[in-house]
């Protein structure tokens, strides 16, 4: 299933290597964090599907509004993801949870569930790298967002090697 979803997402963002690279990196971090943290198979599957599709709303947001802030992504992403995942034969409960995660992946209050927590952490890990964030911003994100031991470890490894850790 993950291969089919990856293929669908790569096709969806055909020609947009920045977006493809982003979701593939988020997927890689999310998969690794989930595995090291010992998620059950069902939660791991939901996490991986959500990681691949979390930014599916960007394309619609850019077409509709000319920009793609997080709130637009959260609004526009679930319908597109639902259609794609249903066409790929994903079960309804998985589709529902993934769409819920997409609808909340830029909302950082009341994070409930390890799939949600890890998705947010993985997205931040990639954004920190892609946006070349510096220590004060990273420290605030670490304090406010990161909760898993693996996510914190990855963040520390990423920032200590770049010299960006205060």
Image (cartoon, rainbow, N blue to C red):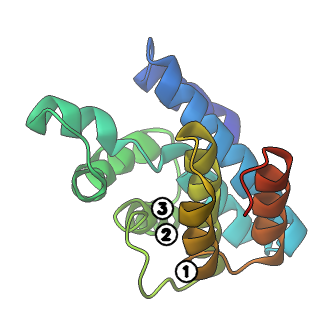
Q: Nearer the viewer, mark 1 or mark 2?
A: 1
The percent coordinates of residue 91 (x first, y second) are 52, 59
Dots 1, 2 in contact, CB < 8 A: no
Q: Is residue 115 visible?
A: no
The quadrant in which residue 24 appears is: top right
Asked whether 14 or 143 is in front, the reply is: 143
Q: Quadrant of residue 16?
A: top left
Q: Is residue 84 above or below residue 125?
A: above
Residue linked to disc 3: 98
Q: Please give the residue where the numbered disc 2 appears in the rendered image.
A: 93
State the image coordinates of residue 27 (x, y, percent, origin top left). Answer: 66, 46
Q: Quadrant of residue 132?
A: top right
- The residue located at (61%, 80%) in the rendering is 143
Q: Secondary structure at mark 3?
A: helix
Residue closest to the far top:
15
Image coords of residue 74 (percent x, y): 30, 58
Q: Is residue 56 above or below residue 32?
A: above
Which label belongs to residue 144? Answer: 1
């Amino acid at each position: 299933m993950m291969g089919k979803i990856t293929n669908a997402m790569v096709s969806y963002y055909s020609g947009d290597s920045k977006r493809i690279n982003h979701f593939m990196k988020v997927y890689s971090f999310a998969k690794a964090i989930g595995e090291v943290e010992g998620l059950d198979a069902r939660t791991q599957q939901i996490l991986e599907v959500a990681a691949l599709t979390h930014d599916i709303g960007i394309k619609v947001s850019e077409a509709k509004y000319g920009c793609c802030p997080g709130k637009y992504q959260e609004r526009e992403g679930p319908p597109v993801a639902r259609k794609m995942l249903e066409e790929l034969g994903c079960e309804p409960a998985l589709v529902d949870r993934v769409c819920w995660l997409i609808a909340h992946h830029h909302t950082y209050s009341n994070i409930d569930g390890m799939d949600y927590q890890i998705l947010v952490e993985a997205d931040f890990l990639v954004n920190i790298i892609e946006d070349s964030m510096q220590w004060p911003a990273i420290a605030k994100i670490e304090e406010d967002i990161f909760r898993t031991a693996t996510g914190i470890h990855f963040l520390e490894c990423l920032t200590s090697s770049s010299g960006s850790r205060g």
